[in-house]
Amino acid sequence: MSILIKGGKVVGPSGAHHADVLVDGEKVAALFDPSYDEDVHADQVIVATGKYVIPGGIDAHTHMELPFGGTAASDTFDTGTRAAAWGGTTTIIDFAVQRTGEVVQDGLAEWHRKADGNCHIDYAFHMILGGVDDDALKAMDQLVHDEGVTSFKLFMAYPGVFYSDDGQVLRAMQTARENGAMVMMHAENGIAIDVLVQQALARGETDPIHHGLTRPEALEAEATHRAIRLAEVAKDCPLYIVHLSASQALEEVAAARDAGRNVFAETCPQYLYLTLEDQLGAPGFEGAKWVCSTPLRSKHENHQRDLWKGLRNNDLAIVSTDHCPFCMKDQKELGLGDFSKIPNGIGGVEHRVDLVYQGVVDGKISLERWVETIATTPARMFGLYPRKGIVAPGSDADIVVYDPAGRTRIGVQSHHMNMDYSAYEGFEIAGKVDTVVSRGEVIVADGNYHGRKGRGQFLERGLSSYLL
Ligand SMILES: [Zn+2]
């Protein structure tokens, strides 16, 4: 099966140019100057005139079916990867989980069981370490060498659940420095946050907004700083800060990067568009929809302006979703009368490509940075490049035809995620995913879905190719 994508503008991190793209089987075979392809024959022609041809999106941070707070994220690998495909994402990197006291490899096996045969697009795993000890450190080596899992997430938050103390963090970083893995960090000072949470509840402050008010930006910045200094002690272990939301934390990352350190960070669409006051502070229990950690930040400070700037200058390398959806009914409602019991998470895997594209329309980032932050850098950062993340000969034919003249209206009626609300209800994007190709197969076209569960493959990842 061959496909010719004709007349579009191919966008990559180093520029945009008119080219026709020939797909042969699962791979990109060639890019042609449009005046040279008269004699190229293909089984199928996709006309992309006036549209962008970009690499399929890579969402490097998702939590399908994650057990959390007495319930589990509402998207399965089936529903979540299907929704991702609708939104132009053709690869996810999900987080397998080792809970405290469990064997790391058992956690990885459990995630393989959940995902195997259920994914609509390709997928890979990071590993969450909830209990760093001698066995877990040995397991890190094994996962890097044998399992294609080359990044490990630690938590400075959630004492008693996923929390690692500084000694555990340092030991994991030292091990990663030796085996080449990336350490990913949930950087919030969870011990201090838990004190603030108990004090707030004792004062009778139970509404969702107190979730944000008890997780002040200083405690994100402090943990970010501490993680960076611990990585320095671990002889410059590569460090990736997940879901960065606060200007002060971004300053810590920027300072480390200015000093030439292998420190990277991602942000998420919710931090680029939503705020503590307008969403988390919505009347009654409504704000529960936007309870996530790190929390949404105040609109009276300049976080969003600073995050967009960070995306422009690469202090923020990637936009991921931290997709972790919970329905209001029976799930978010677990926290009625106590914000600390609201499951933490926002669903957005379907909307990332559009929401970041809106930043291009608004003049906040370039077309090239759009592609780089949603596809190319995630591939390079997490050992998938050049198989993924670029439209080039030899790469997997994961391609999105994006229509800048189209419009996307986001809402619960039209989305495909398994959520009973949308965190972005009513948002209008000045652009639209037109056609999605995943390993040479057209899975979205003309507003119809042609993919199927089980066609997505597990990707063994190599080491990061993004390091200094
Ligand atoms: Zn997460």
Image (cartoon, rainbow, N blue to C red):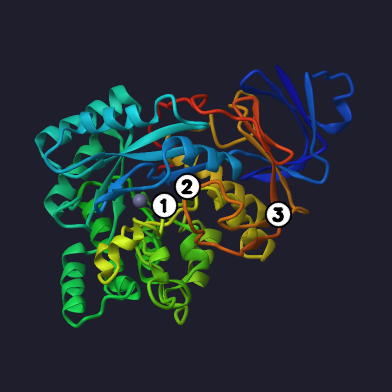
For mark 3, give the secondary structure. Answer: loop
**Residue for badge 1:** 325
At a point 59% along the width and 50% down the height, the residue shown is 353
Kind of element beneath mark 1 = loop
Q: CA distance from mark 2 to mark 1?
A: 8 Å
Q: Position of residue 145 (x, y in %)?
A: 29, 24
- Tell me the amino acid under the disc marked 1: Pro
CA gap, disc 2 to disc 3? Answer: 23 Å
Q: Is residue 315 above or below residue 304?
A: above
Q: Is 214 left or right of 74, judged from the image as shown?
A: left
Report the residue marked by disc 3.
Answer: 431
Q: Which quadrant does the N terminus fall into?
A: top right
| Quadrant of image for the C terminus | top left
**Picture layout, residue 218 above or below residue 21:** below
Label 1, residues with CA under 10 Å away: few <14, some 14-19, many ≥20: many
Q: Are marks 2 and 1 in contact (CB under 8 Å)?
A: yes
The first of marks 2 and 3 along the sequence is 2
Residue placed most toward the observer, 312 or 343: 343
Ranked by sequence position, the earlier of labels 3 and 1 is 1
Residue type highlighted by circle 2: Asn
Q: Is residue 106 above or below residue 401?
A: above
The label nearer to you, 2 versus 1, is: 2
Cβ atoms under marks 2 and 3 closer than 8 Å = no
Q: Position of residue 179 (x, y in %)?
A: 26, 32
Which mark, residue 418? Answer: 2
- Determine if residue 222 is in view: no
